[in-house]
Image: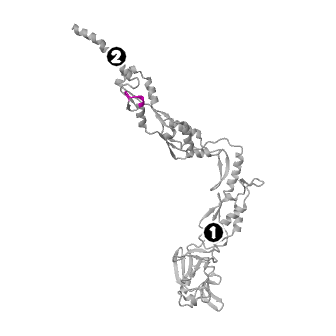
Amino acid sequence: MKKKIKRFFLLFPFVILIVIFLYCMLVFYFRDSFGPNTWINGIYCTGQSVEAIHQQLSKDLGTPAVTVKGFDGKEYFLEGAQIALEYDFATPIYSHLQKLNPFMWFLNTLEGTSLEIQPLILYDVDLLQAKWEAFPFVAEELAREYSARIMLGENGYELVDGYHNRYDLRYAFDTLVAQIESGSNYIDLSFIENDLAVPVGDEYEDTLALWEKVALFQSTGIIYDMGDEQIPLAGAISSAFIMKDGEDFVLDKEGNLVVDEDEIAAFVTELAGAYDTYGMDRNWTTYDGREIIVPKGTYGTKLNQKQELAFIKKNLASKDTLVRIPKYTKEAYVRGKDDIGDTYIEIDMSAQKLLVFQQGEKTIETDIVTGNMKKKWDTPDGMYYVYAKQRNRTLKGEGYESFVKYWMPVNQGIGLHDASWRKKFGGDIYLKDGSHGCINIPKATAAEIYEIVEVGMPVIMYY
């Protein structure tokens, strides 16, 4: 027994020395790493170096990038490399490690430690500033001048006010920086409103007073009703009626804007050029699909430019809605660029056919006889119209006197009428035995046409 006790006392110092040695070894080991049972952001970190833990946590976050939603509501993707954006876990992890006592590593063995560490966000502020200024919604704001000017746009003059309704770019950029530094990878700036106002320049009030006059001038209520469309004179059109000297508006002695009558006349001329058809050859698609040119006749539209010029000058200042149906020196059956419409009479004199169309539908087709070609009484081709209707008329001319029940003149003494003296129509009768120039129609059909036709209805005649 005494020998065993003696051995124990002889070995005890060695055991103590071994324990102390192992303890010191573990103290040395945990000097640069975390103690047993340590977890950081869900990763087991016992014995791992700061750099190893940093690499693992950075990998879990993915490649650094930021999406920015601008004032314009659009999203812009910003790669981390473009602004040297990095997630630094190493610095806060090392800082925490420095606070630990490596001699107390054993305290963590049973209970363990679970830490949540946020990375430091590193980026190059100069690169970020450059990318910020390149965003379209920022570049547009930066391009705005601190001035107020009246500029001509697509819809007339507009006030370009560089003093009001601005975006606070400094506030927006500071918000961007704060969000990036907080670790956010989606930054919404669309909530920022353009409600910033800056001190105005000395000439602002004068410009604003002039703008009120310009805006009032170009807001005229005149609307031209051209049949198939309406043309408001406000905006782009009426703004051209303001006289200018170079870039400056011309004012009279009372400070009012001066009307440019030459520009009004130019507009009326342009309007006539777009809608006048009188005295012009026409492209025409025949009933059987041929594309032809019908020579000018007596049918068509011709604007009364003098009356329209006077009307605009007189009523330009009116703000009440004035729907203007223009005056014409020649007025067609239908108003508009297509002033023939879908109701008309078509006469194919080569085929000796007459057709009546109503609302685009063919309602009558008949054989006819036109002017005698052999005797040079051929019926003239062209765009004409029915300018009268008369029952029981005696037609007189050199060497003839004919009674007709249905008379519809279209070109001086030439017209559509029944021909009771004829028993046959169509074919080549007109070549040697045609009329004196009129369009001869079977009596029953002439009666039917007479009931349909209205004064002014287009008559398209061609060979």
Residue 48 in the magenta stretch? The answer is yes
Residue 132, compared with residue 106, is above or below; it is below
Which image quadrant: the C terminus?
bottom right
Q: Earlier in the sequence, mark 2 or mark 1?
A: 2
Q: Which residue is mark 2?
A: 20
Q: Which residues are magenta?
A: 45-51
Q: Which residue is mark 1?
A: 275
Rendering quarter of residue 235: bottom right
Rendering quarter of residue 153: bottom right
Residue 304, compared with residue 39, is above or below; it is below
Q: Nearer the viewer, residue 49 or 148?
A: 49
The answer to whether the residue labelled 2 contacts the one labelled 1, judged by CB atoms less than 8 Å apart, is: no
Instruction: Tell me which amino acid carries mark 1.
Output: Tyr
Q: Nearer the viewer, residue 460 or 335?
A: 460
Find residue 332 and report its horizontal and vertical position in percent.
Answer: 62, 73
In the displayed orientation, state which residue is furthest to the bottom. Answer: 399
Q: Marks 2 and 1, how far apart in space?
A: 110 Å
Q: Nearer the viewer, mark 2 or mark 1?
A: 2
Residue shown at the point (33%, 19%) measured from the top left: 22
Rendering quarter of residue 429: bottom right
